Amino acid sequence: MFKKETGWSFAEYVNQIRVDQAKLLLLGTNDKLQDIALKTGFADGSYLGKTFTKYVHISPSSFRKRRHSHRIVSIQFLGALVALGIQPLATTRELLQSSKLLHKRLPTIVEIESFDQLEEIRQLEPELIVAPTHFYNYPDIIKTLEQFAPVLTIPWGQLDKLEEVRLLGTLLGRTQQAEEWIAKLQQSAQEARKVIQPFLESDTTAGIFELSHDNLWLIPFLSVCSAYTLFELLGLRAPQTIEQEILQTGRHLKVTEQDLPVYAASHMFLIVLTDDTESFRAQLMQRSIWQQLVYEQGCQLHLLKLNEFWFDDGFSMELQLDVMVKLLIK
């Protein structure tokens, strides 16, 4: 039953999780193999070594030497790697097309059209592949990638955005680069707050809303969809309903268009599916609910392109911060 539902045998799945935890400790600490074995559920260092080599195709000691790798394929965390000064060798078409603000920083990156063309990754001879943990849902892909290079799996959309960069900096031997970039971003945020201050009233609120393919509006929590940039970096205040129902609970919420007045903010950033944002704005304003939001509740609408704001990790935040500031002072 377990294998039918997950694609893994139970023992295989448990070993994969333990091996991936061992990878994080091998790169992120100087712990001895025996200590890592005990922390990850293996009987001893010898058993960990054998299992690790079976799953990763290199020994733990050889893997540890890849801490300073620069030949990295990114299946996620593109912006975080760029923040660390890493130029990923390749990424997926979906990720690249949803990270258009990063394109100028990735002039040589190879675009993998689909996971049916993974052989392209082998030809690039990567030293590491960085992927999100939700790829455990695709065991065949994980196993194939692991034959090309060790796969480093990191939780996506769960960590504080700065901690995400910090973690990757630790794992990839770029702690200093991580701290320098974080300090630079925080300085940019302080300057941005000063720039927008004259344009805000004392009771100004802000919210971010992403239009889904099902025509529902996603109100995100801090770890996704630029909510971190809006509330943590720019320091804007959410409406009470968003604060209580989303930010305090740590869970995003999907609402219908008719529900939006309950979550309305002075500045409503709308992530939409089209690049023609002004035509889309005109379509919205033909509907009574948006007329109510703008003319009766005094909301200002700032439309953002999904392919520039779907991912908000690392260097993407720096670029998105600039876009949002320009809209606030427009």
Image (tube, grey):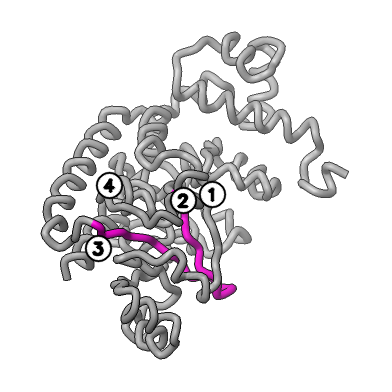
Q: At label 3, which amino acid type do we have?
A: Val
For disc 2, the marked residue is 221
Q: Which circle's residue, 3 or 4, is located before the other in the chain?
A: 4
The magenta region covers 203-221
Separation of marks 3 and 2 at Cα, in angstroms: 20 Å
Mark 3, secondary structure of its residue: helix
Mark 2, secondary structure of its residue: loop
For discs 4 and 1, the disc positioned in front in the rendered view = 1
Q: Are marks 3 and 4 in contact (CB under 8 Å)?
A: no
Where residue 277 sits, quadrant-wise, is bottom left
Q: Residue at x 80, y 34 (%)?
A: 10
For disc 4, the marked residue is 233
Mark 4, secondary structure of its residue: helix
Where residue 177 sits, quadrant-wise, is top left
Determine whether, in the image, residue 179 is placed left or right of residue 9: left
For disc 1, the marked residue is 251
Q: Are marks 1 and 3 in contact (CB under 8 Å)?
A: no
